[in-house]
């Protein structure tokens, strides 16, 4: 008895936790509650700090208790324990749970204790089968570290309790009106996020585990303490709802409550596959593309896969008999409240359940007051757009059947290519069918991956017929286009799709508009047609290629034929012209993906687009440079393709700059760049503008296509002419040897630098021409050129330096980047 209040004393270990505080509130009307905890911060009752991992700390804490309250204790409720869901045998399981319990009991032997109540778990028992219930006599057979530590702690209680009566409460999975045991909370979160794993399960969907509401559990504890003098001296009692709601039933109920689904599709997964996937994911480095992830280890671990078939339905006859207790609540009735709490306050719900919110939810909470409303609105819009684009996925189904029948109908003459197309056709059929569901956008990317393979297959297998090459090229492009070029763009985050401007902050126009992309797409078609034509010669589909100007080696070869059959071309394991054709095709396709907001909604695509244009444009110029130097002739069609690639560069740079600025701003705001790089994000500032107006006159459309962000000042036009002149000095001045090669190299570089500087965002690149001009003033003396070549080189060098001083007119604003355009 407490001498001051006259109430019996109840000691609660782990009292600073949520359950400990709830139990303290339930006991306080009739008991003096004293807490023991590692950190008593926040405890609303008298609390003595203790480290159960230290014998000295336990002795000191109980000495303090004796000084304050004496040696009589009505009940000790032992809640304190270490817990995690990794499945690994952490040292604290033994130090705190097992040996900590031993230290506590040994120290309590000097007290007059009416009862010890231990908070255990039903998971110490071997599971049952669907349709049967386990009782307290079920075998003790825990399957992972936490229940193993609980079973070991109970063994210690049996050894060390001495004269202290004890009650072992084997509790079901805990929940309340807002939170739930981790397995259920993560199940709810997965369905809320619509992740792929939310539709997969590696066990029997009929199995389930019993739950108990916190209020019912606290009531059971209170009844145990109240009945301490009537209970057996050593007894185990199962506490929980007798029925176990199956995993499949929970899936359907949660899906319906969150998304209004009549039936939530759950697909059985073989345990071996699920275990392997969980093992690989657990050991992989934390990454961000929807964990496109949380930067932390996954919740589902391999040991959980092994227990997916465990079934725990309870026989609670003993609780009814000894405690007159049975649950007054049920998980079925409370689940709507838990889900509603999630909808009312998603971020708070995640925090309370100890789950890291998905990045899109955190971003949404920063942008709008009601993240749930944004999720619902965006999901509805996405589904509507998907319904309008179903025709594309049906067409891919048709293309799958076309591929399967192509080898027979087109006479491939290559068994490897035939099998490739048949298997690719089957893959397109399967993935196209899955893509009909809006829930699996990843299937659209997988379909595009098959299309990408089709573009490369004729080159890898050296397609022996033109029909096979043309078929795979066209079908591959169509498969990619129908899979990912139609709306809604897959992979864009909810927040990026819902909020944010079309025009970047401080800009006058969207660098991702159709008017900005159209010149690149048109030029890519030019390059595609040229490359396909040259590839046809390399693959042996045609006997010769057109070359109007340049002679090659011994007849009948011309300059083009000599170049595309040279040692430089044949150094590639596949047709280099064919690789060029694939690149141009991918430029066209990536140019078609996404909206005018893709500078912030699909940064990865903008960077990929830029990589295919800018570095590959430099590679094209390199090939042009080496043609007369290494091979000794020219290729007219190669020059046309290189020019098409080169002119794309200025039209692509502004979108790259806008995306770079966007990522930098997000980083400075404290956001993770990896996630944003793949799924995009919202943006503060900027403005919206109406969609590109293709209903205006052709001249107006052409003007907007050719002028946005790109200009041709007269001084840069003169630099272009100088570059062309330098590349042709073999013809115009009869230059030979090192001087001719130097002129050719510098001329190609002048063209590359000047064309890139036509982009207003890249206008400072023109200063590089000054260095090239200085080189021109040295080369004639280095190579001993004659006076005409020397004079021409000096004049061109001085002109380049002078012409590079003037910036020229910059008509648009580019935010903070404008300061760099000098």
Image: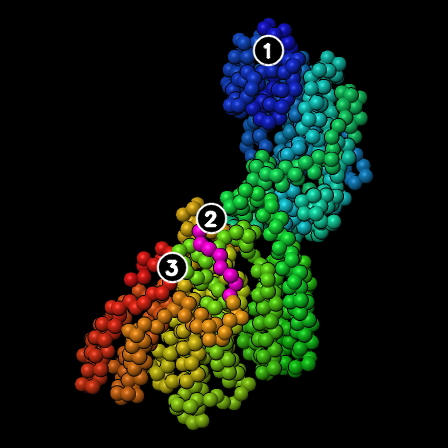
Residue at coordinates 63% horizontally, 34% vertically from top-left? 179
Q: Give neighbour class at mark 3: few <14, some 14-19, many 20+ (Cα, 10 Å).
A: many
Answer above or below: position of 419 versus 629: above
Secondary structure of the residue carrying tag 2 is loop
Q: Which is closer to the viewer, label 3 or label 2?
A: 3
Residue at the outermost top position: 3
List the residue tagged with mark 3.
814
Sooner in the amino-acid sequence: mark 2 or mark 1: 1
Quick check: 752 left or right of 793? Answer: right
Q: Nearer the viewer, residue 80 or 152?
A: 80
**Where are the magenta residues, as a range?**
685-692
Sooner in the amino-acid sequence: mark 3 or mark 1: 1
Residue at coordinates 64% horizontally, 73% vertically from top-left? 421
The quarter of the rendered structure image containing the C terminus is bottom left
Answer whether labels 2 and 1 touch (C-beta < 8 Å): no
Answer above or below: position of 608 versus 460: above
List the residue tagged with mark 2.
672
Give the colour scheme of this rendering: rainbow
Residue at the outermost right position: 131
Query: Is residue 77 located in the magenta-colored stretch of the structure?
Result: no
Residue 431 coordinates in the image, percent (x, y): 66, 63
Answer whether labels 3 and 2 touch (C-beta < 8 Å): no
Answer above or below: position of 408 versus 227: below
List the residue tagged with mark 1.
110
Q: Give neighbour class at mark 2: few <14, some 14-19, many 20+ (Cα, 10 Å).
A: some
Sooner in the amino-acid sequence: mark 3 or mark 2: 2
Q: Nearer the viewer, residue 44 or 96?
A: 44
């Amino acid at each position: 008895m407490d001498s001051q209040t006259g109430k019996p004393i109840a000691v609660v270990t782990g009292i600073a936790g949520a359950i400990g505080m709830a139990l303290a509130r339930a006991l306080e009307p009739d008991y003096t509650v004293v807490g023991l905890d590692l950190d008593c911060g926040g405890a609303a009752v008298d609390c003595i700090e203790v480290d159960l991992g230290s014998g000295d700390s336990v002795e000191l804490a109980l000495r303090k208790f004796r000084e304050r309250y004496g040696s009589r204790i009505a009940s000790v409720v032992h809640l304190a324990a270490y817990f995690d869901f990794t499945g690994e045998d952490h040292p604290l399981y033994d130090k705190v749970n097992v040996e900590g319990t031993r230290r506590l009991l040994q120290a309590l032997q000097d007290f007059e204790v009416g009862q010890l109540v231990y908070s255990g778990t039903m998971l110490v028992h071997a599971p049952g089968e669907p349709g049967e219930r386990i009782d307290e006599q079920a075998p003790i057979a825990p399957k992972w570290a936490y229940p193993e530590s609980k079973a070991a702690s109970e063994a210690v209680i049996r050894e060390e309790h001495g004269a202290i009566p004890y009650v072992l409460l084997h509790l079901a999975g805990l929940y309340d009106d807002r939170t739930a045991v981790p397995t259920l909370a993560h199940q709810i979160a997965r369905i809320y996020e619509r992740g792929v794993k939310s539709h997969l399960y590696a066990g029997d969907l009929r199995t389930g585990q019993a739950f108990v509401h916190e209020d019912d559990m606290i009531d059971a504890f209170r009844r145990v303490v109240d009945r301490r003098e009537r209970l057996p001296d050593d007894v185990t009692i199962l506490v929980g709802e007798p029925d176990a709601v199956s995993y499949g039933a929970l899936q359907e109920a949660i899906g319906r409550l969150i998304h209004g689904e009549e039936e939530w599709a759950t697909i059985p997964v073989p345990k071996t596959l699920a275990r392997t996937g969980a093992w690989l994911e657990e050991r992989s480095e934390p990454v961000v593309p929807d964990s496109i992830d949380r930067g932390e280890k996954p919740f589902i671990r391999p040991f959980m896969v092994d227990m997916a078939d465990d079934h725990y339905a309870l026989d609670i006859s003993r609780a009814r008999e000894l405690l007159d207790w049975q649950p007054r609540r049920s998980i079925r009735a409370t689940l709507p409240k838990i889900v509603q709490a999630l909808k009312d306050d998603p971020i708070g719900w995640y925090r309370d359940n100890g789950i890291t919110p998905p990045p899109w939810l955190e971003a949404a909470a920063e942008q709008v007051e009601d993240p749930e409303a944004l999720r619902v609105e965006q999901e509805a819009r996405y589904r509507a757009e998907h319904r309008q684009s179903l025709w594309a996925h049906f067409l891919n189904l048709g293309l799958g059947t076309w591929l399967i029948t192509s080898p027979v109908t087109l006479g491939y003459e290559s068994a490897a290519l035939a099998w490739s197309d048949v298997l690719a056709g089957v893959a397109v059929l399967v993935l196209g069918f899955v893509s009909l569901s809006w829930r699996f956008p990843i299937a659209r990317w997988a379909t595009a991956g098959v299309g990408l393979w089709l573009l490369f297959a004729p080159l890898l297998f050296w397609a022996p017929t033109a029909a096979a090459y043309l078929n795979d090229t066209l079908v591959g492009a169509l498969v990619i286009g129908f899979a990912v070029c139609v709306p809604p763009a897959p992979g864009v985050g909810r927040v990026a799709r819902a909020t944010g401007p079309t025009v970047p902050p401080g800009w006058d126009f969207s660098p991702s508009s159709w008017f900005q992309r159209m010149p690149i797409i048109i030029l890519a078609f030019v390059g595609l047609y040229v490359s396909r034509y040259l590839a046809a010669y390399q693959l042996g589909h045609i006997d010769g290629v057109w070359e109007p100007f340049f002679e090659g080696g011994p007849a009948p070869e011309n300059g083009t034929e000599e170049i595309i059959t040279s040692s430089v071309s044949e150094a590639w394991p596949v047709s280099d012209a064919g690789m060029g054709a694939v690149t141009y095709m991918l430029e066209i396709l990536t140019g078609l993906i996404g909206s005018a907001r893709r500078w912030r909604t699909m940064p990865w695509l903008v960077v990929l687009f830029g990589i295919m244009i800018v570095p590959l444009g430099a590679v094209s110029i390199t090939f042009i440079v080496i043609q007369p130097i290494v091979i000794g002739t020219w290729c007219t069609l190669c020059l046309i393709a290189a020019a098409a690639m080169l002119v794309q560069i200025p039209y692509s740079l502004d979108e790259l700059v806008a995306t770079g600025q966007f990522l930098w701003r997000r980083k400075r705001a404290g956001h993770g760049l990896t996630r944003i790089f793949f799924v995009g994000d919202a943006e503060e500032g900027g403005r919206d503008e109406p969609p590109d107006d293709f209903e205006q006159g052709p001249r107006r459309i052409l003007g907007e296509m050719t002028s946005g962000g790109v200009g041709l000042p007269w001084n840069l036009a003169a630099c272009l002419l100088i570059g062309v002149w330098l590349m042709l000095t073999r013809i115009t001045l009869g230059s030979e040897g090192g001087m001719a090669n130097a002129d050719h190299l510098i001329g190609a570089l002048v063209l590359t630098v000047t064309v890139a500087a036509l982009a207003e965002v890249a206008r400072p690149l023109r200063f590089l021409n000054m260095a090239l001009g200085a080189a021109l003033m040295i080369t004639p003396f280095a190579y001993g050129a004659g006076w005409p070549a020397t004079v021409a080189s000096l004049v061109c060098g001085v002109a380049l330096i002078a012409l590079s001083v003037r910036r020229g007119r910059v008509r648009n604003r580019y935010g903070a980047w404008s300061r760099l355009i000098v």
